[in-house]
Amino acid sequence: MALARHSAAKSDRSAPSTVTAGTVSARPRGGALACGLVTARIGLGLAALGRPGYLNVGHGAELGDDRSVAALRARTFEVLDFAYAAGVRDFDVARSYGRGEAFLGEWLRAHNPSGVHVSSKWGYVYTAGWEVAHDPPEVKHHDLATFRRQLAETRENLGEWLQLYQIHSATPDSGVLRDDAVLTAMQETDLPLGVSVSGPSQAETIDTALTLGLFDAVQATWNLLERAAEPALRRAHAAGVRVYVKEALANGRLADRDAAALAAVLAQPWATVVLSGAASVDVLRSNLRARDSAPAELGPAEDSAAYWAHRATLSWN
């Protein structure tokens, strides 16, 4: 079945507005992004803020002892306040980030900030029950029923602030990019759509996504240690697709040189948004130094398969 690209994406806005789903139709790419006039900017991902455990090296030390819902809600508000005051306007979350969507939605409704761009993801179910190291902490479900349920949950949390809805960690094995029922249901939302990828097959998954012509954005891991997806990310950028970079500090492995490592990602001409995964104001403040720092040199990267095998050994803390 042929799938056409959905209708025009909503632009950044100062306050929520009522949106009525329209007829699914093709739309042109272009504007400042396609002309190369937009430089990469730092955004904030809430993977390490919305739940008490995460696999980032040093996450437990960054959060401290109090990981109650109330404490993490207050911490999330504090980090969001600081981020916005520092000029951060891109906020990325997911259904599996514990209470990340709920915290972000509360903050948005409380502050009604102007010029923000909010993205979320569906496809993983949070199963940790607010434990730090539950096994497993999240489970992938890329089926139609999960999409419909999680879309409703996301909309309840984020309302009309939601401006990009992404498949969470698509891989060739998950089969989601071959599932016409899921792709059609996504298209019928009339939301701008994206796909995040992970693992050593990132480039393959990105290229498959590009052939579908459905997606406004891709989100991938790229950092000083893992750069295998770069050719595909360049192709995505050339096609007018926004490129979000996650795990730019390799899940904390590059934290000791965060500014230079993040600056190296910001310097890539194909990058649109580079996500900080900070879980504290101090770490975010340090990350934001990248905007005025010289980029680290791109030395030899690790073997991609070895990089992802190492990531799989990281413990939730």
Image: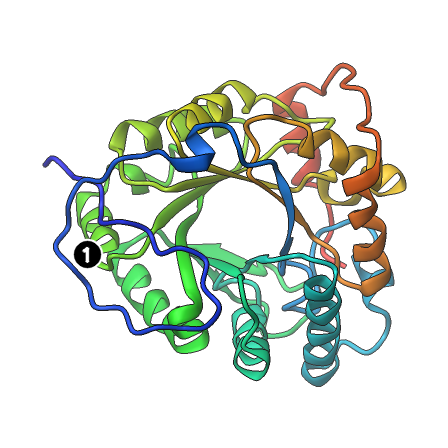
- Residue in view at x 74 percent, y 27 percent: 224
Q: Where residue 313 sits: x, y (%)?
A: 71, 41
- Quadrant of residue 189 within the rendered picture: bottom left
- Image quadrant where one finds the C terminus: bottom right
Q: Is residue 139 visible?
A: yes
- Quadrant of residue 131 within the rendered picture: bottom right
- Farthest residue to the top: give it: 300
The relative height of residue 299 versus residue 257 in the rendered view (above or below) is above
- Residue in view at x 39 percent, y 36 percent: 31
Q: Where residue 10 sits: x, y (%)?
A: 35, 56
Q: Which residue is mark 1?
A: 188
Q: Is residue 123 visible?
A: no
The relative height of residue 155 versus residue 58 in the rendered view (above or below) is below
The relative height of residue 47 versus residue 17 in the rendered view (above or below) is above
Residue type at tag 1: Glu
User: SS at mark 1?
Assistant: helix
- Residue in view at x 54 percent, y 62 percent: 116
Q: Where residue 121 sits: x, y (%)?
A: 45, 56
Q: Where residue 60 sits: x, y (%)?
A: 82, 62
Q: Nearer the viewer, residue 91 or 304?
A: 91
The relative height of residue 26 versus residue 86 in the rendered view (above or below) is above
